[in-house]
């Protein structure tokens, strides 16, 4: 007897089937099926033959492949009971009553049960989890979220890697027999292995073709397994890199986010953008426009001075900033990164009257005030460490990172201490924003650390519901759907080099919406690359996301200030629809051009950003095709910044000299012809449906 269940969203269907009470398998995942589809017949139709050299029965690729049932690949569960390796055998699948689809299978002999839960999000994403319950404590070595089949009609997979100031790099890896495993064991989701992957079918492009997307909503380190078996079947697993190192009776994976789109990489990316923005992030004040940031880090570093910072704040407000963030250096005896983490008291040497004078000045300028913390860390040279050396995570002789250790966030007394210190600062000062940093790797991976961070964040969010929090981890070291459930912004990279940012933002758009992605106009000479870039390019790159400034504003020339003020005013005039819209990556036949298109939720407005990062291999630009437009509608298209043309650009280019009116079909097929550009030029093309 075959039991079947289906999970439907607007664009996708997931069909689950169980034969004889076995652990269910995903027998279909893809474009939405007709409501009348016979699921039992579908399940039978997906069964496979047996060939030579095989077992007499094909072990099932279930939601949790079982080693005890001769599964030849990576199992979905590995554990020990009483110190001995156990091989569970689950059966008796039954649906658990309730709103979301929950299916439970049991192993009575070992006293274990597995529960698979599937929820439907308004974004069209399917959210899946696996839970293990035991009658007595067990040691868990691996638990996968519901295991899914990899697409058969695919040649490659796309996952992400990166490094400090080089986040969200795309890896295109061919499917091949064996395992492609990505594992983040640094105690955070990581620059190195962000927990996202895309699985396009052969022929899929940015704008067309079938693409399956997966994201694992967990901040403590994860493992991804993409395996092709000798029989040709493929499986995809996601789970924690490590669960708690202490035996327990229940374990649950993080949410696994499932998306399917037949509109290419953009289709899958837009689904994830919308899910993050509208279903995961909780906004303190949903009606408030995203404020223009100013962050003082690359202006003063640890050299805090009220007079200097007040002058910088005045300049920031005059340029259009609406929030001023005081970064590292305000507490303890923090003159460099070697001391005082953990001593969350205002430094009376630098701030004899507390932060009140600066906050009053900032608020008098019409800006709100934010403050930097790094709560999870401690310096050996700190009063906290001298009082509580046992609060540090890991061995005494471990290697330091940035001259600091990690606090053991699994300990309630550590969380209580941090909550008390932070709550005292927040309650006594007019602060509406926290930049929450995390600047070193953990000495060991343990899920209890991330659980403790979540608990502290939740307590602070509950106590101060109007305070917005940014997730920063040496830039983009902790960007995942788990941390975004408790924060509202991510610092995508410590690189404010606009050429580097252009690429990082472009690739991160496959998972991140503009509203949560911080992007700042950096100094004229980048502090991370040494590159000198023009203000117009720096400003427009920042205007692609949640805009801010991070430089010593006293260095600006009058022309630079005027340009920054103009672009900031443009961003503020357009942020309402841009921050609620979708980002579509545009295919470019010119490797020197990185282009994207932001489209309003109603489809009536768009803006194209086409960034020239290097000299093109050919003399003249190639046409840029647009996407996500109504083919029959007519759009008015205009180049926002024709003055960016270099002297070599001297032809009768229509886009530079007139406003064009073209159909969506023409814009998607013939495209638009850009002017000749120097490197470090951003073309901005605005469009409106007539």
Image (cartoon, helix red, strand yellow):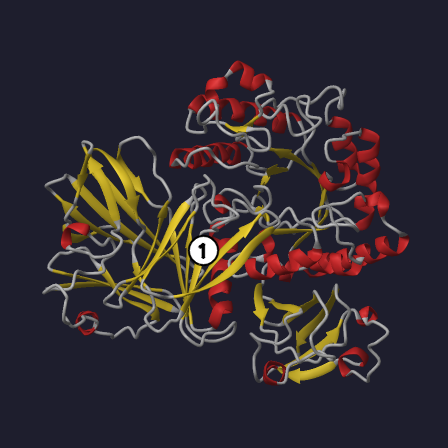
Task: Tell me, yes or no, if residue 87 can be seen here.
Answer: yes
Q: Position of residue 104 (x, y in %)?
A: 20, 50
Residue at left offset 45%, top offset 43%: 219
The part of the image, by quadrant, that contains residue 583 is bottom right
Left or right: 203, with 110 as reference point: right
- For residue 353, above or below residue 624: above
Task: Tell me, yes or no, if residue 99 can be seen here.
Answer: no
- Residue most toward the front? 53
Left or right: 520, with 7 as reference point: right
- For residue 356, above or below residue 612: above
Is 11 in front, or is 655?
655
Which residue has dot 1 on it?
196
Q: State the count of labels.
A: 1
The part of the image, by quadrant, that contains residue 13 is bottom left
Quarter holding the C terminus?
bottom right
Residue at left offset 24%, top offset 51%: 75
Left or right: 230, with 286 as reference point: left
Q: Position of residue 276 (x, y in %)?
A: 50, 54
The part of the image, by quadrant, that contains residue 598 is bottom right
Q: Position of residue 210 (x, y in %)?
A: 41, 72
Is 463 in front, or is 644?
644
Instruction: Mark 1: give few (<14), some (14-19) or many (20+) Cα within 10 Å.
Output: many
- Residue most toward the top? 387
Residue at left offset 68%, top offset 73%: 687
Residue at left offset 21%, top offset 70%: 39
Is 388 in front, or is 353?
388
Where disc 1 sits, the SS reads strand
Q: Position of residue 611 (x, y in %)?
A: 69, 66
């Amino acid at each position: 007897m075959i039991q079947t269940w289906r999970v439907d969203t607007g664009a996708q269907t997931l069909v689950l089937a169980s034969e004889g009470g076995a652990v269910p398998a995903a027998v279909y995942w893809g474009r939405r099926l007709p409501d009348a589809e016979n699921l039992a017949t579908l399940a039978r139709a997906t069964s496979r033959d047996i060939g030579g050299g095989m077992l007499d029965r094909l072990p099932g690729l279930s939601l949790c492949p079982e080693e005890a049932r001769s599964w030849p690949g990576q199992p979905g569960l590995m554990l020990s009971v009483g110190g001995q390796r156990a091989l569970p055998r689950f059966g008796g699948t039954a649906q658990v009553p309730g709103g979301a689809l929950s299916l439970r299978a049991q192993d009575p002999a070992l006293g274990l049960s597995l529960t698979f839960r599937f929820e439907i999000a308004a974004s069209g994403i399917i959210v899946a989890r696996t839970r293990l319950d035991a009658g007595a404590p067990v040691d868990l070595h691996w638990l996968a979220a519901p295991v899914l089949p990899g697409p058969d009609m695919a040649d490659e997979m796309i996952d992400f890697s990166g490094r400090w100031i080089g986040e969200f790099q795309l890896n295109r890896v061919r499917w091949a027999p064996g395992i492609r495993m990505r594992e983040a064991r640094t105690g955070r989701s990581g620059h190195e292995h962000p927990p996202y992957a895309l699985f396009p079918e052969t022929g899929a492009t940015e704008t067309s073709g079938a693409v399956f997307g997966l994201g694992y909503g967990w901040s403590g380190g994860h493992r991804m397994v993409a395996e092709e078996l000798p029989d040709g079947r493929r499986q995809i697993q996601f789970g924690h890199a490590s669960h708690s190192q202490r035996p327990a009776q229940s374990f649950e994976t993080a949410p696994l986010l499932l998306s399917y789109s037949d509109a290419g990489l953009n289709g899958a990316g837009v689904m994830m953008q919308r899910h993050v923005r509208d279903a995961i992030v909780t906004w303190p004040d949903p009606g408030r426009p995203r404020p223009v940031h100013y962050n003082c880090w690359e202006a003063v570093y640890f050299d805090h001075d009220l007079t200097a910072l007040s002058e910088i704040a005045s300049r920031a407000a005059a340029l259009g900033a609406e929030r001023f963030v005081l970064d590292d250096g305000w507490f303890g005896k923090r003159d460099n990164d070697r001391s005082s983490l953990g001593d969350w008291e205002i430094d009376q040497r630098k701030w004899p009257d507390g932060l009140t004078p600066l906050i009053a000045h900032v608020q008098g300028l019409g800006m709100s005030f934010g403050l930097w913390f790094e709560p999870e860390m401690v310096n050996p040279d700190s009063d906290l460490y001298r009082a509580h050396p046992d609060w540090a995570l890991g061995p005494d002789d471990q290697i330091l990172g940035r001259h600091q250790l990690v606090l053991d966030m699994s300990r309630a007394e550590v969380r209580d201490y941090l909550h008390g210190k932070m709550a005292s600062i927040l309650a006594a000062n007019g602060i509406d924003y926290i930049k929450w940093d995390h600047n070193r790797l953990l000495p060991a991976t343990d899920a209890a650390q991330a659980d403790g961070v979540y608990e502290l964040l939740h307590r602070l969010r509950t106590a101060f519901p109007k305070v917005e929090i940014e997730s920063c981890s040496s830039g983009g070291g902790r960007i995942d759907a788990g941390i975004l459930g408790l924060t509202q912004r991510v610092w995508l990279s410590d690189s404010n080099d606009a050429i580097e940012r252009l690429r990082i933002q472009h690739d991160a758009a496959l998972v991140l919406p503009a509203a949560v992605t911080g992007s700042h106009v950096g100094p004229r000479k980048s502090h991370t690359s040494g590159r000198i870039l023009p203000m117009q390019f720096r400003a427009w790159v920042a205007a692609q996301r949640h805009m801010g400034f991070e430089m010593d504003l006293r260095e600006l020339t009058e022309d630079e200030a005027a340009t920054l003020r103009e672009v900031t005013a443009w961003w503020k005039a357009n942020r309402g629809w841009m921050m609620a819209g979708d980002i579509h990556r545009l295919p470019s036949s010119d490797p020197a051009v990185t282009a994207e298109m932001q489209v309003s939720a109603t489809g009536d407005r768009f803006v194209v950003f086409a960034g020239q990062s290097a000299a093109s291999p050919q003399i003249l630009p190639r046409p840029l095709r647009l996407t996500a437009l109504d083919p029959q509608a007519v759009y008015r298209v205009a180049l926002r910044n024709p003055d960016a043309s270099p002297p070599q650009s001297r032809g009768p280019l229509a886009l530079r000299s007139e406003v064009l009116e073209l159909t969506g079909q023409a814009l998607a097929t013939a495209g638009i012809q850009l002017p000749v550009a120097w490197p470090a030029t951003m073309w901005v093309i605005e469009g409106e449906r007539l």
